[in-house]
Amino acid sequence: MNNIQNIFYNLLQNLNISYKRYFFDIVDFNEKLIGIFGDRGIGKTTFLLQYLKELDLPLNKKLYINVEYLSLSNINLFELAESFHKRGGKVLVIDEIHKIDNFEKHLKLIYDLLDLKVIFTGSSAIKLEHSKADLSRRTMIYRVNGLSFREFLELKLNIKLFSYSLDEILNSHEEIAFEITSKLKPFEFFEEYLKFGYYPFYFDTSKENFYLKLNEMINATIEFDLAHIFNIEPKLTIKLKQLVTLICSSKPYELNISKLAQKIEINRNTLYQYIYYLHRGQIFNNIYPLNKGDTIFQKPSKLYLNNTNLLYAYCENIDIGTIRETFFTNQLKINHKINYSKIGDFLIDEKYIFEIGGKNKSFKQIKNIENSFVVADDIEIGFKNKIPLWLFGFLY
């Protein structure tokens, strides 16, 4: 326990990041058990340490633990929590909990037996959602994204910008875009965001090393996180990596399951499983028709890499339409339901139809459709139902 506390104190002393992600505005810290899920590299650990540093409690009553420490020390999670509780501990933060076998049972014991607030992070919420220990009703779960375009601009320019709800953008996008463009020129920074800006570590590394680090991070997600969560044999993880690369060569609406399975030399059912695993690991973003669940053997109508940074990291020739749609779905998925639409490109929240394109994109495909909008790239300010693509980067 003393060693773990000393590691925690050193982490707090070396924490010199003042910028706060949008997480701080959405997490209800009054809950007893809180789960923060999201892909690697988006700032979950920094968020936890910032929270603990500002928390008005004596140092010995709060504790951060990365589960790798437990593995190296052969320490039982519940026993550690019990020991911390006996010493007067009040808040326990557990990072990368998905690496612990049967972590749900440990959390249930802590929740039921100890007067202790627990905040934990992981790469996938799937094990918790299907927990036999029925933890899902005890836990407040938050799924978090990488940097929005708004957050990227705040970090890049050291300024404060507002976020807007989807309804605010749909109803007042001209006024909002006018206000933002009076402070900055979005296209001066938009391409940089699409290539590098989704992951906060971009600001701590060179552009030359960014994709190397990103590739290492995705490999770690597949080889360790997904392999552990879904019991994938180590020799088969290469198939998931191949799948990530192959998705780059096919447009989202031209997904050919048979050809993909052939190229990777696996059967169709296994391919469906891998697509599902990568979706749950937030490497893929699968889009389904309305009333079709994201079950393992349901073919997505469209399949995207999770964010545009991954496109530039893995794809040699990137279709501009894929870049636009990847950005749009990535920025909306955190707070909105996205479905495939036969009329336009996407149905959002079972209400709005969106067609994505360049500045000359017309309303032809969605003409006379109620609650339909064109989302256009390469325009600063829109008009009526034509909205700038970049503005959807201000949703959070």
Image (cartoon, helix red, strand yellow):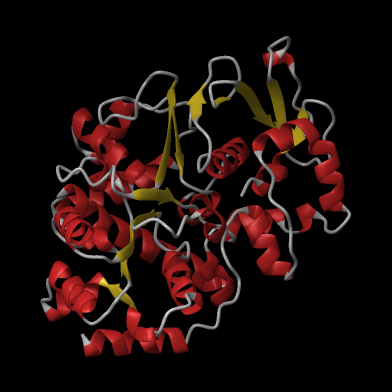
Q: Is residue 380 visible?
A: no
Residue 40 at x, y percent in the picture: 39, 61
Answer with left or right where residue 202 lies relative to residue 64: right
Look at 16% across and 79% down and name the residue there: 72
* Residue 14 versus residue 264 in the image, above or below: below
Q: Nearer the viewer, residue 133 or 23?
A: 133
Q: Nearer the viewer, residue 227 or 164?
A: 164
Q: Residue farthest to the top?
A: 368
Residue 231 at x, y percent in the picture: 14, 50
Residue 324 at x, y percent in the picture: 62, 39
Q: Is residue 361 visible?
A: yes
Q: Nearer the viewer, residue 67 or 282?
A: 67
Answer with left or right where residue 364 lies relative to residue 293: right
Answer with left or right where residue 108 lies relative to residue 295: left
Look at 43% across and 49% down and name the residue there: 143
The image quarter in which residue 183 lies = bottom right
The quarter of the rendered structure image containing the N terminus is bottom left
Look at 58% across and 39% down and name the residue there: 319
Q: How many marks?
A: 0
Q: Nearer the viewer, residue 267 or 372?
A: 372
Residue 230 at x, y percent in the picture: 19, 47
